[in-house]
Each structure stands twice: as structure tokens, then as C-alpha cells.
Image: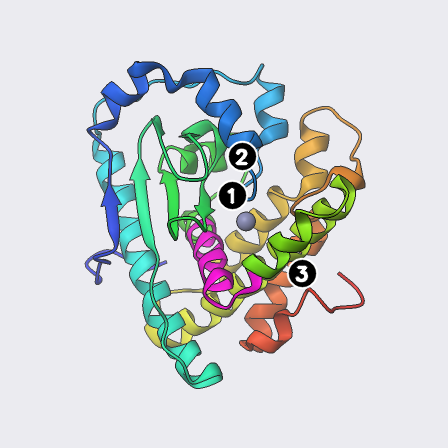
Amino acid sequence: MKWQGRRESRNIEDRRGRSKARAAGGIGGVGLIAVLVVGYFLGIDVTPLLQDQGGGQVVASGPMTAEDEAAGKFVSVTLADTEDVWAQVFKEQLNRQYTPATLVLFKGATSSPCGGASGASGPFYCPGDKKAYLDTDFFVTLERELGAKGDFAAAYVVAHEIAHHVQNELGFLAAANAVRAQVSQAKSNAISVQIELQADCFAGIWARAAQEKFASIDRADLEEAVNAARRIGDDTLQRNAGKRPNPHSFTHGTSEQRSRWFVTGYQSGALGSCDTFSSNEL
Ligand SMILES: [Zn+2]
């Protein structure tokens, strides 16, 4: 992805650098547990990975490095791309205005209305304050632990979280979560899968529009995104954690579903093609 020297978003809240005291202040394991149980934050589910590693250990953040600075810029450019694309899609397909999300960059640990967050728990979107939360160290996890290589894998993660904001703006999250609060865990998980696959589809819409608008994406980039979607499928994550995949516990969809819905959004470019809530076949 071509990103150097391109427009950066103003909607970045950079909490890095001031997070050290916060992390040392002992959000630690308790904060991590909070983020895993507080309802309906929408993140990349790396729970199996955490368990695999003995879980719950939050690594305190160190000083900002050159890599952190570059990752922050990359996220900021990607966020700016999502703003331009979603403003256009909202106008063209819905005749309405898009209100952008804020993206919080943190290092180590931070707090949100959806619960405490640590980099180890993965990026997420909190509908409560309409902010996406991202520890850029997650990109290292993405590449080394999850096998999702390349800058566009990271861009896909940003686009996926912003897609949750799009869902929030469109009222899908509130509607889905109202139902989730009243049904069994298994049904709630199934609705979560519908939410997540729609976010993957929206990320595909973004990739297509960004490609047309900025010519910043090439074929290899798309393969990186599709691979990333595969790598964070529930079945693959559980298998990599040495477990037998349990479909009732899935909250994000299988590798096949995640990559397929991303491609669906990419190929159609249309919001209507991402209706995972009434699709007969997920
Ligand atoms: Zn998600």
C-alpha cells in the first residue's frame, strides 16, 4: 500500500507516551479480564491466543520507538482513507453524511467505556464513545503470532474496526446488541458472527473504493488482506491454540467466511451486498 507522504487523519487520539504510568498503575491482569467480559466491544478476538500463552499478562509499554512513529503515521493515513471513502459511499449509496470515528492509539494499556484495554487483547471498537482502540504493537502480533504479513493486513484491521463504526452509524450495532442481550449465549454468539462478517464485507467495500480513489492498493495488498481475514478466523485461532474448533463458541466467523465476505464487499462495492443479517448462507 502506498501511504508515505499522504494525508493523515485529524481524528487520531494518541495516548502513547503517557501510557507508561497507566500501565504501571496496575491495569494489568484485571484490566485484561475486564476487556474480555465487558459486553459488546467489537475486537479482533485473540482470546485463544492469549490462553495459549498462559494469558492475562500485560506487558508494560516501553518508550516510543521509530517503529511506533511509523505505525502511527500508517494508521493515520489509513484512517484518512476510510474517512474519504465512507463519506463518498454514504453520499452515493445512502444520500447521507458520514461522521468519522476517533481512533485511539495506545501502548501497553488504556481505558475505554467498554472496559480496560491492553494491546494483548487486540484492537476493538467501542460504540459507547464511538472510538476505535489500537495498540500498534498488535501489528507485530498480527505478523509474528497470527501469520498475517504485510502492511495491507494492518490496513484491513483498521478498516475492520472502522467498519464497526459504520455499522454503529447505520444503527446495526444497537439493533443487534438489543437482541443479543435477550438470547442465549449461543444465539448471541451467532449474532456476533453476523456483525463481524458484515464488518469484513464493509472492509472489502473500503478496499475497493480506496483502490479506485487513491490507486494506493495493488494485487499483493489484496492478498494480504484476504490472508489476514483467514488468519483471524475463529476456527483457525482455536486450532492454532491446540483446540478443536467449536462452532457454538465462534464470535467472528470461520476463516473461509471472513475472507469470503471481505471479497464479497470488494467485488460489489455495495452496502446492500453486505446484509449478513438476512443472508441465508453466512
Ligand atoms: Zn470486529
Residue range in magenta is 156-172
Element type at mark 1? loop
| Residue highlighted by disc 1 | 41
Amino acid type, mark 1: Phe
Reading the chain from its start, which is encountered first: label 1 or label 3?
Answer: 1
- The residue drawn where x is 40% and y is 39% is 113
Observer-nearest of 169 and 239: 169
In the picture, measured across the screen, residue 43 lies left or right of residue 151, that is: right
* Marks 1/3: CA–CA distance: 23 Å
Mark 3 packing: few (<14 Cα in 10 Å), some, or many (20+)? many
Mark 2 packing: few (<14 Cα in 10 Å), some, or many (20+)? few
* Marks 2/1: CA–CA distance: 7 Å
Amino acid type, mark 2: Val
Q: Is residue 171 magenta?
A: yes
- The residue drawn where x is 40% and y is 82% is 91
- The residue drawn where x is 51% and y is 52% is 224
- The residue drawn where x is 77% and y is 42% is 184
**Disc number for residue 38:** 2
Where 81 sits versus 118, above or below?
Answer: below
Rendered location of residue 267, percent (x, y): 59, 74
Tell me whether the residue at label 2 lies in contact with that at label 3, contact meaning CB atoms closer than 8 angstroms. no
Tell me whether the residue at label 2 lies in contact with that at label 1, contact meaning CB atoms closer than 8 angstroms. yes
Rendered location of residue 183, percent (x, y): 75, 47
- Select label 1 or label 3 by which is in front: 1
